[in-house]
Amino acid sequence: MTTQYRPPSMALTTVGISLATFMQVLDTTIANVSLPTIAGNLGVSVNQSTWVITSFAVSMAISLPLTGFLTRRFGEIKLFIWCTLLFALTSFLCGVSQNMEMLILFRAIQGAVAGPMYPITQSLLISIYPPAKRGMALALLAMVTVVAPIAGPILGGWITDNYSWPWIFFINVPIGIFASVVVGNQMRGRTDKTERPKIDYVGLVTLIIGVGALQVVLDKGNDEDWFNSTFIIVTSIVSAISIAIFLIWELTDKDPIVDLKLFRHRNFTYGTIALILAYAAFFAMSLLMPLWLQRNLGYTATWAGYATAPIGVLPVLLTFFVGKFAPKFDLRMVASIAFVVLGVTCFMRSDFYIGVDFYHVALVQLIQGLGVALFFMPILTILLSDLQQNEIASGSGLATFLRTLGGSFSASITTLFWERRAVAHHEHLVDHITAYDPGTRAAMESMGDPQTAAALINQMATQQGYQISFNEIFHVLGWVFISLVLVIWLTRPPFLAKAGPAASGGH
């Protein structure tokens, strides 16, 4: 007879696990605002410095779906501790890098060890909490997932301005060591069942090539002008062929390195679809808002951060209540309310204009926080609810991988659409401005110098083009969220997150 393992201190164990997750999620965005400084210090162009972000994203995307295999091989506790320690070590190495090549290499290794950390965190939290309190654990994880990416650019900018860019990496070292020591000490009495699964070399190689190439295409597509670039065309073909081979092989192999058969579970399938689409839309909002504030409203990076930060207020304040009371309701209804709130805030932004003030921007961000607070915990619980105990880590890793990939697609599509539609609207606006129009002549005469007037009018048309494109995107995102209400109701109760594969400690 097995009994669920309880660490000596649930609170201390939760703090250790949460800190490691916060550190890992924070690092997905903390370097973004520091790229110009890093590029200047290391003597490269800003465009070359974006590989600091791409290398991390590519490696993490590859390692995420391998979480299940690595868990079976090493056990959850060992995998978590080693990944956390290696994350701290590679952070230090990133900070002491003397050139861009070193920094990109260590960021790639950092991304590889970061991949399994989030899925393992989900599995560990579920395994140590009793069924009645697992909603609380997932709500806490959801809060960390939301707050860390928001804090990343603000903290990164502050550290870079007041100290130096290496410290955005050095701060991970004490956090990683503390988290790994705490979790290792608290859970040393738990026995993880391990095995030596056959290494699926075909699956591993095609995964690395296919997903790696796809992530490069998504990250570099806009910079390279998409399919006008030979590099993007070749990389896309390589990715498509590799992923096709990977899917066919993994669905037919007896011991696949990524278990795609998890999609036989109804709740996992529809819950993951909802997670991918909702996170993609959420990521699009999170990406576009600061860009719009800086380009159209003239905000600095710091003030753009302040304007968008209120989205994290309600998730922090409501974590306890969501975790405690949400499981008492039908989680499909909780998720539906979240999607409606998120959709409504998108529609509110679709009415924004160039003269909108800071208060209104921040207020809509604050309201959106309610939707975010109610979104992650129900979706995570639903998609994990019908997995078997030994499938939790694999399912969490696969869902997180697809969620991350959805975010990458969203970032590329959103940026491309915003730019292309802005150009189209600019052309439409200037078509109506001619020297034969009395209103145009009067406006130009009032500005004095004709060349200055023409440049100013062109600038205004460009600004309005981006604004109209911004409004269009948020209108579409609003309907995406509303449509997800239908998707989530395709799942079926009961929605009780099961304990992970090593939830039983003593025998």
Image (spheres, rainbow, N blue to C red):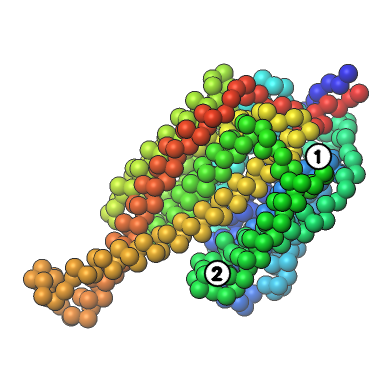
- The residue closer to the viewer here, 458 or 169, is 458
Q: Amino acid at mark 2?
A: Pro
> Can you see residue 113?
no
Of helix, strand and loop, which one carries label 2?
helix
Q: CA distance from mark 1 to mark 2?
A: 38 Å
Instruction: Write the residue at 39% across / 52% down.
Output: 473
> Can you see residue 499?
yes
Pointer 1 with pointer 2, Cβ within 8 A: no
Q: Amino acid at mark 1?
A: Glu
Residue at mark 1: 76
- The residue closer to the viewer here, 240 or 66, is 240
Residue 49's spot in the image, x, y percent? 60, 70
Task: Give the image quarter of residue 81.
Answer: top right
Q: Is residue 270 left or right of residue 425?
A: right
Query: Dot 1, how many residues are within 10 Å of its Cα: few (below 14), some (14-19), or many (20+)?
Result: many
Q: Is residue 156 left or right of residue 5?
A: left
Instruction: Write the residue at 80% across / 28% down.
Output: 503
In the rendered image of this protein, does residue 429 appear above or below residue 112? below
In the rendered image of this protein, does residue 64 appear above or below residue 502? below
Instruction: Write the residue at 82% across / 31% down.
Output: 502
Q: Earlier in the sequence, mark 1 or mark 2?
A: 2
Of helix, strand and loop, which one carries label 1?
helix
Which quarter of the image is occupied by the C terminus? top right
Residue 61's spot in the image, x, y percent? 67, 54
Residue 17's spot in the image, x, y percent? 72, 39
Which quarter of the image is occupied by the N terminus? top right
Residue at mark 2: 36
Residue 226's spot in the image, x, y percent? 51, 68
